[in-house]
Amino acid sequence: MSTTSRHPLVWVPSLYLAMGLPNVMVGVVAAIIYKNLGVSNEDIALYTSQMYLPWVLKPLWAPLLETYRSKRFWVIGMEFTMAAALGLVALCLPLEGFFRLSLAFFWIVGFASATQDTCADGVYMTTVSKIDQARYSGVQGMCWNLGAVIASGLLVSLTGWLHNHMGLSWVQCWMVVVSLAAVAMAAFGGYHWRVLPPGSPSALHGQGLAGGLRATAQAWVSFFQKPQIWMMLAVIFFYRFGEGFIEKFGPLFLLDAREAGGLGLDNEALGHINGTVGTLSFIAGAFLGGLLVARRTLPRTFFALALVLNVPHLTYFYLAQSMPTDTLTIAAIVAIEKFGFGMGSVGHMLYMMQQIAPGPFRMAHYAMATGVMALTKWGTGSASGLLWSHVGHQYLSFFGWVLVFSIPPVLLAWLAPFPHEREESAEGREAAVAAH
């Protein structure tokens, strides 16, 4: 069977697993590594947030990728590149200058991951029909988040087990675990070599650098000519605004000692919460979100999905106020936030894919939309360190501000424009019928 005729379930789950894992290794797990190795919260927030910039900047080179080789080629090449870069991160951790060296290699992972994301989404959008895009949106979102949870949950839990039960130092623990992540990315590259379809070739294919540069200019001009584009970009930017602060400081809060205002968990407990409980919550939320959109359409469900994502930010404020000591209680409360994030993120992804991306530069325009989403992560992550200092290192005040930051996303979701509403609604109804 050729790769072009393989069923989407053969390659969509592994493709989005391979996208989620390195993204969170760079954005979240790196922060936990540096926390264990004694770096301050302010430095962690500042320097790890800058590693979101590759996802912000990827629209600058996304059109150029359409002129050379296939989307499949870039996906597989970047997966092997990330495997090598993660291996170098593991090797440099015992060195005296590990912080700067590991940041440099994480930057390579970030650029490769951002490039992989662009082309992987291109494969998905040009291979899978719009009806099946709605049908598999839950699988797509679930597997991306599952890759993220494996990185921030199971791998983090493994470092705690190695440290607590095997007596390894934190450096040794993280060398083992980051090496496993490198092996996983190499395995994804080998598997996708066999099963990943090439994606439909762009009209720019074979036009070289000059054609790519012309296309880049055309892509940017046409992007900002889309109807209601500035309002749509505001919706995308703010949709996960509050969640961006939780993503960076949530794990630090759970790990920090109680005398510092944290919950005093170790890596093993944190990993179990994000891995076992978080995985189940993500899966349930993502599948329910995909099912809801397929049956009701995105325009009818978008506001509800924004509420489901943002209202659970109350959980971290409650944790900082009540300071529970029972791990099961903490896990149950965090699971609410994970469920909301899994369900709400489906709306975010489909809004970019179905309302912003359509047009002659579909892959490039989707990359631009996700670049705006990454700009949110970069901005909130960078600002989180400043906010942490401003509130005097008080987690209760910090998460109180997060609740304030979660109001604009809900208001903008209510006002969100849907320029492709008729087309999307018809496709949603067809997808709901096909699902039965």
Image (tube, grey):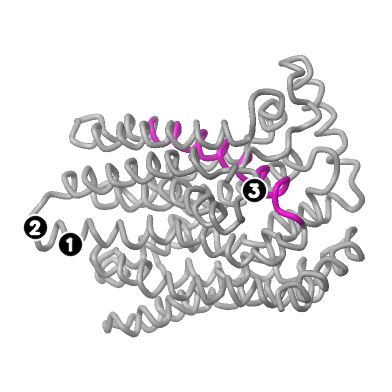
Kind of residue indicated by mark 3:
Ser
Viewer-side residue, 187 vs 308: 187
Q: Residue at x 62, y 60 (%)?
A: 241
Q: CA distance from mark 3 to mark 1?
A: 43 Å
Amino acid type at image mark 2: Met
Percent x, y of residue 179: 27, 42
Q: Tell me the element at label 2.
A: loop
Q: CA distance from mark 2 to mark 3?
A: 47 Å
Tell me, yes or no, whether the two marked residues, 1 and 2, touch with CB atoms within 8 Å.
yes
First to last magenta residue range: 105-129
What is the crowding at mark 2: few (fewer than 14 residues within 10 Å), some, or many (at least 20)?
Answer: few
Residue in view at x 44 percent, y 51 percent: 21
Q: Is residue 184 left or right of residue 306?
A: left
Identified at 54% across, 55% down, the residue is 10
Q: Main secondary structure of the magenta part?
A: helix
Q: Quadrant of residue 424?
A: bottom right
Q: Residue furthest front?
A: 1
Residue 185: x and y, percent?
Answer: 40, 42
Asked if residue 121 is among those painted magenta in the image, a careful observer would answer: yes
As rendered, which of 151 and 397 lies closer to the eye?
151
Q: CA distance from mark 1 to mark 2?
A: 7 Å
Circle 1 sits in a helix, a strand or a loop, which is it? helix
* Residue contact between numbered discs 2 and 3, judged by CB atoms under 8 Å: no
Q: Is residue 54 visible?
A: no
Nearer to me, 416 or 201: 201
Q: Report the disc number at residue 161.
A: 1
Q: Amino acid at mark 1?
A: Trp
Residue 248: x, y in percent? 45, 56
Determine which residue is flagged by label 2.
166
